[in-house]
Amino acid sequence: MMRPILCVLAVALASCHTQPRWYKGNLHTHTLWSDGNHFPEMVVDWYASRDYDFLALTEHNIVADHEKWVGNDLVIRRGGRTALADYRKRFGNDWVDHREVKGKLQVRLKKLDEMRTLFDDDFLLIAAEEITAGFKGKPIHINASNIAGRIPPQKGASVREVMRKTLAAVNEHKKQHGLRVLTHLNHPNFGWGITAEDLAVVTEEHFYEVYNGHPSVHHKGDAKRPSTERMWDIANTTRVRDLNAHVLYGLATDDSHNYHNASGSTPGRGWVMVRATELSADALIEAIERGDFYASSGVVLDEVSVDANSMTIEIAAQGNATYVTEFIGTRRGSDEIGQVLARVPGLRARYHFSDKDLFVRATVTSTLPPDNPVFKDQKQKRQAWVQPVVPADLRGKKQ
Ligand SMILES: [Zn+2]
Ligand SMILES: [Zn+2]
């Protein structure tokens, strides 16, 4: 087929970008490299053999770039009684490196570069780390994706200082290696580590997990503390109204550790859909930084478009599901944080901005449950979370 003329010219200039499309990925996963319970290639294969386009292995304070051996007794203790046999069956005996030390069987964990040789070019494995720190028992976990090597966890005199020092360390790494690195703050309610106020004032961070598929992260908050989703609106109200700062964007992730049975943090619960021109870490992160992505626990969107006057969402129908889109935001001069500004049923929802809006985001809820619900007793439904939009006159210098 003949290439369009513009593309021919672009090829001459060594870049021929296609139209943007949606790419599906999970930016929070664990394997035996840290506290996950399966061999890394088996985990990558779980995603690559489904409809995912990209994955980040985000181990606690470690990157899969050096020699590391794991005892099979540990693998079994973590629930992987058949893990080694399954691993050998999937990738062949020749692929699996093993040795015996003092009569105990050990297996070498493959590095990212080795893993990449197993999967096609249409699946992207991103080098990443869950920078795992804390302050007085409060967990402070920040994922850094697209890194050149390990970034050590930081210490500080408060939760906010640890957050800031972690982000500064990533920034330094970014400059040193000339890489586009994405940081996102993980599961703020895990161990009740990070409050909405912390999220608001550490404005260097532009991303957090609005949804994390781990069952122990207090996604819904409790009687005294807000849900993870509600924290989003509290933080963004402060950021836009008082701090003239960039809004927080929300990701959904798996934070998967368990690949052997149906309990615990299993894969396939939360992901992002990113609209990018190509499948590369650089293009994906550039789109995420622009806010051109949404978070999902099962709802698929065909289109999210924003112009000066409105936001429009088009939902892809699934089975006999019906949908409600809630446009949520805070109004200027109002004390009501994160109010539902409009509730629109159907496959197409449009919101016309008001000159009173501080920011507007959307949550789409299906009548169908997720394939792998986290809150089995609470009638969880599939959702999608669309990024907040700030009116042009409120986008300050720090945007
Ligand atoms: Zn974590
Ligand atoms: Zn994690």
Image: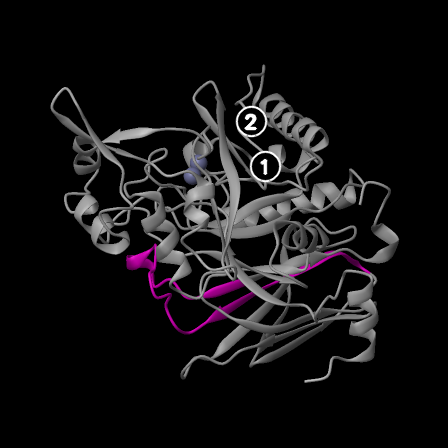
The answer to if 108 sits in the magenta stretch is no
Mark 2 sits near ligand 1, with its Cβ under 8 Å away: no
Seen at 48% across and 23% down, the residue is 134
Seen at 27% across and 37% down, the residue is 97
**Extreme residue in the top direction:** 157
Position of residue 106 relative to residue 394, above or below, is: above
Q: Quadrant of the C terminus?
A: top right
Residue 354 can be seen in this image = no
Mark 1 sits near ligand 2, with its Cβ under 8 Å away: no
CA gap, disc 1 and disc 2: 8 Å
Q: Amino acid at mark 2?
A: Ile
Q: Is residue 80 left or right of residue 60?
A: left
Image coordinates of residue 260 in percent, x first then y, are 22, 49
How many marks overall? 2
Q: Which residue is mark 2?
A: 151
Q: Quadrant of the N terminus?
A: bottom right
Position of residue 246 relative to residue 108, above or below, is: below
- Label of residue 147 in the image: 1
Tags 1 and 2 in contact by the CB under 8 Å rule?
A: yes
Q: Amino acid at mark 1?
A: Ile
Q: Nearer the viewer, residue 299 or 278?
A: 278
Q: Quadrant of residue 105?
A: top left
Image coordinates of residue 212 in percent, x first then y, are 45, 48
Which corner quadrant of the figure contains ligand 1? top left
- Label of residue 274 in the image: none
Residue 295 can be seen in this image = yes
Seen at 83% across and 62% down, the residue is 355
Q: Quadrant of residue 314?
A: bottom right
Q: Is residue 33 left or right of residue 88?
A: right
The range drawn in magenta is 356-384
